[in-house]
Image (cartoon, grey):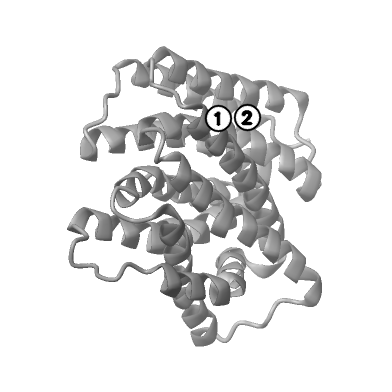
Amino acid sequence: MDRTAAGWMNGFIGMAIFSGSLPATRVAVMQFDPVFLTVARAAIAGVLALSLLVIFRQKRPSLRDIGSLMVVALGVVVGFPLLTALALQHVTSAHSIVFIGLLPLATAIFGVIRGGERPKPAFWLFSILGSALVASFAFAQGLTASPTGDLLMLAAIIACGLGYAEGGRLSRTLGGWQVISWALVLSLPLMAAMALFLMPETFADIEAPALISLGYVSLFSMLIGFVFWYRGLAQGGIAAVGQLQLLQPFFGLALAATFLHEQVTSAMLAVTVAVILCVAGARKFARS
């Protein structure tokens, strides 16, 4: 398997893992404060990341990489989890998931700005078309909107796109799992302190689904998913592999329908096929 194909494979695995993030967050915020959920998931993942770095004796990043790691931390360790957790107090996970359709475009734009990538003009056509299809699908569903929830989700997409692009760029030299691990470790002192301060007095009233969801977003969404995702971005290109996020809303909607019993219409299948074609087209024209 060549480097580009491996990048798409790793990116797909990462995308599939991330698809469960918003449904799991929706379940968790039903019983956990969104700020506690954000810092707790980062603290748990940070402890695991620190353990991995020590066990595998990873070299410390250089001083010139610290700024980029801080951008990654602000974007995907703090920004996206906190903003989505706050948004999910106002909208359903099904409604929030459709905003993920804008994430590939945001990632591609930051990939150009921060990663120095220059996709062909046709790439932007397929990327914009794919985002438009996802947005149109959202409106067609007639999902109840909340201005507050929508603004929070838009802010989350911007933060995440920047964090993805910066992490993908840095992964070319540091490695995929090392980037997210160091970003988590940099955040760990503050996240751990806040988690202890905001921790509920007792977990006795917290039901199993909320605890399982906390475990999922801490282990898979915050750490394992990024191992594959950043590796995929580094191997296959930030703008190109980032287009796989166009598929995440449909994976997430399927999960929301299965586990949260949220309504998803049969139109999802037709739009999914169209989006897959857009992803294929974007992949073909990603390289300048």
Crowding at dot 2, Cα within 10 Å, few <14 / some 14-19 / many 20+, comes out as many
As drawn, is 164 to the left or to the right of 277? right
Specify few, some or many for label 1: CA neighbours under 10 Å numbering under 14, 14-19, or 20 or more: many
In the picture, measured across the screen, residue 118 lies left or right of residue 11, that is right
Instruction: Please tell me which residue is depicted at 60% across the width and 19% down the height of the picture.
Output: 129
Residue corresponding to mark 1: 279
Q: Are marks 1 and 2 in contact (CB under 8 Å)?
A: yes
In the rendered image, is residue 254 in sight?
A: yes
Quarter that holds the C terminus: top right
Q: Determine whether 138 is above or below 9 in the image.
A: above
Residue at the limit of the structure toward the front, as seen here: 201
Q: CA distance from mark 1 to mark 2?
A: 5 Å
Looking at the picture, tell me which residue is in the foreground, 166 or 125.
166
Tell me the SS state at disc 1: helix
State how many labels appear: 2
In which quadrant of the rendered view does residue 283 lie?
top right
| Tag of residue 282 | 2
Residue type for callout 2: Ala
Q: Amino acid at mark 1?
A: Val
Residue 251 falls left or right of residue 228: left
Q: Nearer the viewer, residue 147 or 25?
A: 147
* Residue 273 coordinates in the image, percent (x, y): 42, 21
Q: Classify residue 187 by image quadrant.
A: bottom right
